[in-house]
């Protein structure tokens, strides 16, 4: 009986020992997996820190594709670490890291080469002025030629650069400055003459019209090209005026002859309007296009008086 009990205890002991050994093996395997995961987590945390440092190096005002992809990669890493899905993020991180560091030429977009004019403009705006007087004179003449050809496409601050060139040339005793001053005065005088000539032409035109208004019997027909009622009134006036050959009919475009219209306070009035004058003095006026010709005829008779 004692022998059987001893054998039973021995079998139980062996079985228990084998179980312990199996558990030890499983614990060792789990320790390896834990270490691998810990190492991977540490690596990803290092990647996170590197990406964060890269993002700091970019200026917010001019954020580029590189910085944007860095931000996206960083966000995904943070989310992956927080979720614990470490293994699922590895491929994503490597892909985004490649995209973030991908050379610009691989994108297939090449910058358009600058023209000689663009290069010269950039040099004027960014580089110091030439020390040599002749080179500076040539540069100024080129800049002035550019301004004349491209008056609507002048870079900001370009005029200041031109003034700076003239100032330096004046200090160097260049004759170019005196020539430019003379040309500027000539241009200014030509502009004044053109303005005066235009004003004189307008004045003479108005004077002739005013002279015509001041004498005799006159009907001023104020209208506009866009006004359909004005055209209808013109036809009626033309028919009525056949019976009054001594009355002058003068058509006045209210848009073109604002001064004349202003003299009769018509700038804010709707057209058509007829003003009846005797020796320059108003005797009557008719607003709008009358339904019957007799409204015009009655005023014509009154004008003849």
Image (cartoon, helix red, strand yellow):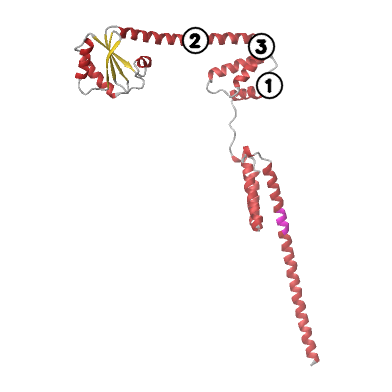
Q: CA distance from mark 3 to mark 2?
A: 27 Å
Binning the other alpha carbons within 10 Å of mark 2 as few (below 14), some (14 to 19) or many (20 upward) gives few
| Mark toward the viewer: 1 or 3 | 3
Earlier in the chain: of badge 1 and badge 3, it is: 1
The x and y percentages for residue 272 are 29, 21
**Residue pushed farthest bottom?**
1
Q: Please indicate, yes or no, whether residue 139 appears anywhere in the rendered image.
A: no
Binning the other alpha carbons within 10 Å of mark 1 as few (below 14), some (14 to 19) or many (20 upward) gives few
The x and y percentages for residue 151 are 53, 20
In reply to whether residue 42 is colored magenta, the answer given is yes
Residue 274 picture quarter: top left
Earlier in the chain: of badge 3 and badge 2, it is: 3
In reply to whether residue 303 is colored magenta, the answer given is no
Q: Quadrant of the C terminus?
A: top left
Earlier in the chain: of badge 2 and badge 1, it is: 1
Question: Given contact means CB atoms under 8 Å apart, are the residues at marks 1 and 3 in contact?
Answer: no
Which residue lies under the disc numbered 3?
Answer: 170
Which residue lies under the disc numbered 2?
Answer: 192
Circle 2 — which element?
Answer: helix
Note whether 305 is above or below 18 in the view shown.
above
Query: Residue 128 got which mark?
Result: 1
Circle 1 — which element?
Answer: loop
The residues colored magenta run 38-43
| Mark toward the viewer: 2 or 1 | 2
Binning the other alpha carbons within 10 Å of mark 3 as few (below 14), some (14 to 19) or many (20 upward) gives some
Q: Quadrant of the N terminus?
A: bottom right
The x and y percentages for residue 167 are 65, 14
Residue at 60% across, 21% down: 158
Question: Given contact means CB atoms under 8 Å apart, are the residues at marks 2 and 1 in contact?
Answer: no
């Amino acid at each position: 009986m004692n022998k059987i009990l001893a054998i039973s205890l021995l079998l139980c002991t062996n079985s228990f020992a084998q179980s312990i050994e199996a558990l030890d093996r499983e614990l060792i395997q789990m320790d390896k997996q834990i270490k691998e995961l810990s190492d991977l987590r540490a690596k990803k945390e290092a990647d996170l820190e590197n990406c964060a440092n890269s993002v700091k190096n970019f200026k917010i005002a001019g954020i580029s594709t590189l910085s944007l992809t860095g931000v996206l990669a960083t966000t995904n890493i943070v989310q992956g670490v927080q979720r614990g899905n470490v293994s699922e993020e590895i491929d994503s991180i490597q892909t985004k890291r490649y995209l973030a560091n991908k050379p610009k030429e691989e994108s297939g977009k090449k910058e358009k080469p600058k023209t000689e004019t663009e290069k010269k403009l950039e040099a004027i705006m960014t580089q110091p002025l030439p020390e040599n007087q002749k080179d500076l004179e040539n540069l100024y003449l080129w800049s002035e030629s550019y301004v004349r050809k491209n008056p609507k496409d002048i870079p900001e601050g370009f005029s200041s650069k031109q003034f700076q060139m003239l100032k330096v040339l004046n200090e160097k005793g260049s004759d170019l400055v005196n020539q430019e001053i003379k040309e500027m005065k000539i241009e200014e005088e030509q502009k004044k003459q053109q303005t005066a000539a235009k004003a004189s032409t307008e004045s003479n035109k108005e004077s002739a019209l005013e002279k015509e208004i001041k004498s005799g019997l006159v009907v001023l027909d104020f209208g506009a090209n866009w006004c359909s009622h004005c055209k209808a009134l013109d036809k009626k006036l033309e028919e009525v005026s056949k019976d009054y050959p001594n009355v002058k009919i003068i058509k006045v475009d209210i848009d073109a002859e604002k001064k004349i219209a202003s003299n009769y306070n018509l700038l804010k009035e709707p057209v058509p309007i007829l003003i009846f004058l005797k020796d320059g003095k108003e005797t009557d006026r008719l607003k709008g296009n009358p339904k019957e010709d007799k409204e015009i005829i009655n005023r014509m008779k009154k004008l003849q008086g």
